[in-house]
Amino acid sequence: MSDTILILGACGQIGTELTQKLRSIYGADNVIASDIREGNAEMMSSGPFEIIDATNQEQILSVVQKYKVTQVYLMAAMLSATAEKYPLKGWDLNMTSLLAVLELAKEKHIQKIYWPSSMAAFGPTSPKMNTPQQTIMEPSTVYGISKVAGEHWCNYYHDKYGVDVRSIRYPGIISWKTLPGGGTTDYAVDIYFDALKKGTFECFLSENTRLPMMYMDDAINATIQLMQADEKSIQIRTSYNLAAISFTPAEIATEIKKYIPEFTITYNPDFRQAIADSWPQLIDDSAARKDWGWRHQFDLASMTKDIITNLQAKAEESAEV
Ligand code: AKB
């Protein structure tokens, strides 16, 4: 039987690009995008779209039955900085949506689930350098608590009910097509936009705050690769560590200066500094590399070149219109 995919939270930073990539692989009609509100023109015109509140199990089930969905990618989430402002709302969105799809898989309405965890599942007592796959996990944020709990729910539903749920602990994801919202790593996206538009950027993290990051293309490839991997190769049912690059605000600024020499950066750390300080600096992702062949392609230099080239081309296009 061929796969029919439902993406919950398709209009977010990762969901938007994931939807287009999955539509190009599985055929537009086989990838149903959904979110609590309509998406951009490309999202709405390139394939089926449904309004779904990811915490509403009945709404999910009715779309699953309507399209005979086999796989669900649950991309709806409240990220670290916003969840610190609205702890109970963050917990509710992140947990209720996960338990809703796990239950649907347990009841055999769907066959496979993708659910993203995050490096935020680690905390101040986890090793900061080469953070192992299995180590102390005592997160200090609501978002991190929801990710650790979610990982254990995934593992539980797999072991107890045979649910095929797969997960990655994403580092900060850097993109230029759709902006992130409410994350602590968002500065590494905003910096490119401000560098091109204003020539200057005020960073909400201090200059030497090193965090694990990844370019969107690598994150999308990893996600689809994990979902397509042979079930027997998936040894970890909590969530896989995933890494690509680690850099500081000062280092990304230096890279941007190679293209925009007059670019300046200032530092004004806010409450997100404490969140960043509680996270790893460099993650050991050898299990993902061994079990399902994960390899990243973009480093800081190639990612910066790609983003600046694309954003400059987009600016020229809109100037011509
Ligand atoms: C955030 O900053 O909250 C996210 C994440 C690391 O999961 N980008």
Image (cartoon, grey):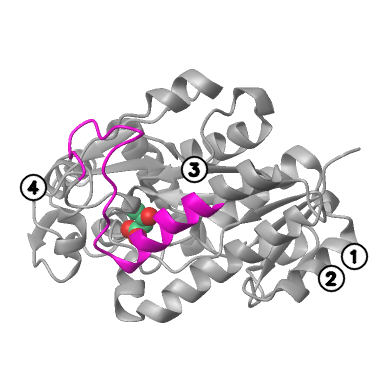
Q: What's drawn in magenta, residue-wise?
A: 126-153
Judging by the rendered image, the residue that carries numbered circle 3 is 238
Q: Are marks 2 and 1 in contact (CB under 8 Å)?
A: yes
Q: Are marks 3 and 1 in contact (CB under 8 Å)?
A: no
How packed mark 3 is, by other alpha carbons closer than 10 Å (few <14, some 14-19, many 20 or more), is: many
Furthest toward the front, the residue is 160
Residue 51, x across and y down, in percent: 72, 75
Work out how far the residue at label 3 is from the one at label 1, CA to CA, in angstroms: 30 Å
Mark 3 or mark 1, whichever is nearer to me: 3
- Circle nearer the N terminus (3, 4): 4
Judging by the rendered image, the residue that carries numbered circle 4 is 208
Dot 2 lies on which element? helix
Q: Is residue 202 visible?
A: no
- Circle nearer the N terminus (2, 4): 2
Residue 168, x across and y down, in percent: 48, 42
Ligand 1: does it lie within 8 Å of the C-beta at label 4?
no
Work out how far the residue at label 2 is from the one at label 3, CA to CA, in angstroms: 28 Å
Q: Amino acid at mark 4?
A: Asn
**Could you say which is closer to the camera, residue 179 or residue 170?**
170
Mark 2 or mark 4, whichever is nearer to me: 2
Judging by the rendered image, the residue that carries numbered circle 1 is 66
With 296 as the anchor, is 122 left or right in this view? left
Work out how far the residue at label 1 is from the one at label 4, CA to CA, in angstroms: 51 Å
Q: Amino acid at mark 2?
A: Ser
